[in-house]
Image (cartoon, rainbow, N blue to C red):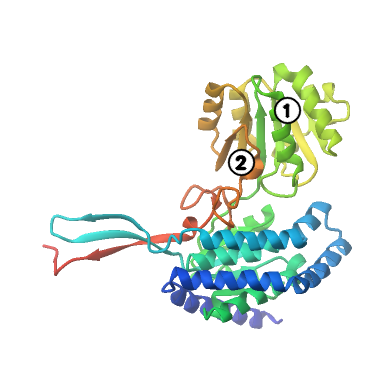
Amino acid sequence: MESSSIKNYILDSAKNARQSALALSCMSTEEKNRALQAMIIHLNSRRTEIQRENKIDLENGRINGLSAAMIDRLTLNDARIDAMIQSLKELILLKDPVGTCLSEWTRPNGMTIKKIRVPIGVIGIIYESRPNVTVDAASLCLKTGNATILRGGKESIHSNRALAKILQDALIEAELPKNAIQLISTTDRQAVGELLQLNEYIDLIIPRGGESLIRRVARESTIPVIKHYKGVCHLYADKELNPKQAVSVILNSKVQRPGVCNALETLLVHESLKETFLKEICIKLIESGVEIRGDDATCRVCPQAISATEDDWFAEYLDMIIAVKTVKNVKDAIAHIEKYGSRHSDGILTTNQTTANIFLQAVDSAVVYHNVSTRFTDGGQFGMGAEIGVSTDKLHARGPMGLEELTSYKYIVTGNGQIRE
């Protein structure tokens, strides 16, 4: 596609989305849920179509040398399709926030003011690898009355096209605007640049993917962006911990699905546990196939560990690799997280509530945990249905973003002829 054609294509998509957003803002919850139900039926009945296109992406990914973790993110097996369907079912049952009255008051002159939740409008989602984001993002936007423009990565283009076609067919069947969900079908990088300049039609951009993508979006966009750059997630194993529980939480945080942003990347261990718990957890991690990059103390008790460099403390591995460091106390752990963390998800493992409270209050991350796996930083796990992403920003939305985070508000003022003196 020529440069001018891409520009016009993206502009037309944005204009169509704006018109669809205006129509969606007046749709009832029942109408939106009917479309979500149609999506469930189509996803379930068209699995062969989805997996046929996904197979093309997987084969191309292997040819192009994608890592095992990236191939995992790309895969749409029956379990992943079931998970998308389940998310839609849960989304239907969730309360629609649009129209909710947040507050109401009456002024001395009799004028009544209501603060009401409303859709944001048009939301652009720019993402990589994980084609399930196509369904998650589009369905959350639809439930909240937002039109969405989806731009997935080239590695998942066939999967995304198949899913987007299914979602649009469901919209047509439910008699909702087809262009309420649009996929940018070209993989040309120019498309992203064009999209980021259309602040006249698009209200919000949410990037999901690698740090380089997100930094590009934040740098080039004339549209507000909600983002997280990376997930350098930490767990601090305090001297007063339950060893059995701590081992379970650490292994789940690191091993259960290492290629995602809420997976554990750095383990901090109280120095008094060097000869006991640290040795035990290193053995468990190595038995699970995890490569350890440790400080001097860790390397002494675990000969298989590789000596960590300064870069390892900043690293988001998204792989079966973990950085391990000993610290003097909870304040030392907090200082490490403040310097090297990404303000995503960090936790403490301790039976001492006072120590836990110090950590939970001082660590400035979107989600902080006490004796819980970091893998729960997820809209579905938080009871939000699907999620549209995780934000480490502090304005408008922070942490897993569900339905409420996809709304804004407006004031509705009513009276009987009041004028300002």
- Label for residue 188? none
- Quadrant (top left/top right/bottom left/bottom right) for the C terminus: bottom left
Rendered residue at 59%/63% (across/down): 88
Amino acid on which the number 2 mark rests in the picture:
Ser
Residue 337 sits above or below residue 222 on the image:
above
Q: Which of the 4 quarters of the picture holds residue 328?
A: top right
How many marks do you count on the picture? 2
- Give the mark nearest the N terminus, 2 or 1: 1
Q: Which of the 4 quarters of the picture holds residue 330?
A: top right
Amino acid on which the number 1 mark rests in the picture:
Lys
Looking at the image, residue 135 sits to the left or right of residue 75; the answer is: left
- Distance from Cα at disc 2 to Cα at disc 1: 18 Å
Rendered residue at 64%/19% (across/down): 240
Q: Which residue is mark 1?
A: 325
Rendered residue at 55%/73% (across/down): 35
- Quadrant (top left/top right/bottom left/bottom right) for the N terminus: bottom right
Residue 241 visible in the snapshot: yes
